[in-house]
Amino acid sequence: MRVFVRDYLLPWVFIIVFWLVLWFIIPPVREHLNAMNIFAIFLLLIPFLLVALHFVGKTLERYGYSREDIKRLSEIIEKTHGRLYLPKEVFNIVGDALIFWGLFAWVLLATGDPIMGLLSGVAMFAEIFAFFVLLISMFIWVIIFPHSLYRLFTGREPSRDFLIEVPIKQNLIYTAILVAVRLIALHSGYPSGDDFVGELMAFGRKTELVSLLLELSGLNFLFGITGLYGPRKSRKLTALALTVIVILQLWVAWRIVFG
């Protein structure tokens, strides 16, 4: 248990303490700190941890464990620490959940209104996740594309796990968020403004930007499908097709970033 407590549990606790100290230091947030709000933000921690445990369970399954093994997570981490990448993945999943919780709670405290704070937090993350379509493309350029070309030119097929998980599954999730933001912005009477909800509405009403992100999403999906099924016909043509798709992605991304 010593390794688990020292290298995992204590850093997670430190993240929570860090947020608490930060909230007490920053005046706009400190003004809204009271017993009710503190109770609310720690209550909010529960769903974030539940989501983290869900992904920890999926990670355990990838390493041959079952979801029920979460109950002995500390024991598994003790045994695999320094030998497998599993402990680092678990650490990052929980750590990321605590960071996102802190950001969400910050928004809630900054508004001083629990309902508006909740809406603002949702709006903030919705806008971030809508832009993850671009992040998926960047991941393709840096990781998946070179890896796929290498495998194609060495007589193998690209990694199905990579292609299914990132350009297809995750891309579709973030695209769904983008479409939802667009529809809400178009049919909502909430005005564009400097607050998080107003910024989300302004983002969703930018037709050109949303269209470019949707184009990028389509190219991400096309990359995944081409990488999955193209090698069955021709590896060389698949490599060429993937290269063309990446060039088109770069062109769309350039237009998004630089107009």
Image (tube, rainbow, N blue to C red):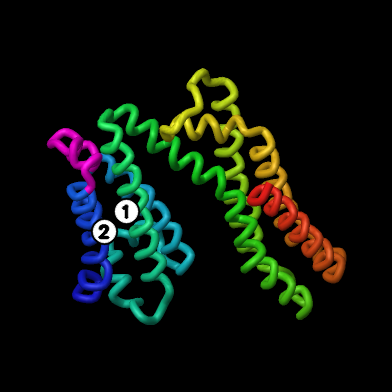
Question: Which quarter of the rendering shows the N terminus?
Answer: bottom left
Q: Residue 40 placed where, x, y %?
A: 22, 36
Q: Locate residue 32 relative to residue 167 in the image: left or right.
A: left
Q: Residue at left 21%, top 43%?
A: 27
Separation (CA) of disc 1 from disc 2: 7 Å
Dominant secondary structure of the magenta stretch? helix
Q: How many marks?
A: 2
Residue 40 lies in the magenta-colored region: yes
Q: Residue at x 39, y 31 (%)?
A: 119
x, y (%) of residue 31?
18, 37
Write the residue at 24% across / 75% down. 3
Residue type of the residue flagged with mark 1:
Leu
Secondary structure of the residue carrying numbered label 1: helix
Please, what secondary structure does the residue beneath circle 2 have?
Answer: helix
- Identify the image quadrant of residue 183: top right
- Mark 2 is surrounded, within 10 Å at the Cα level, by few (under 14), some (14 to 19) or many (20 or more) other residues, namely some
The disc labelled 2 sits on which kind of residue? Ile
For the record, the magenta segment spans 26-41
Up the image or down, 218 lies above or below 206; here it is below
Between 62 and 191, the one lying in front of the other is 191
Which residue is tagged 2?
A: 15
Instruction: Identify the image quadrant of residue 89.
Output: bottom left
The one nearer the camera, 145 or 236, is: 145
Q: Is residue 81 above or below residue 11?
A: below
Q: Which residue is mark 1?
A: 98
Asked if the residues shown at circle 1 and circle 2 are in contact, with their CB atoms under 8 angstroms apart, the answer is yes
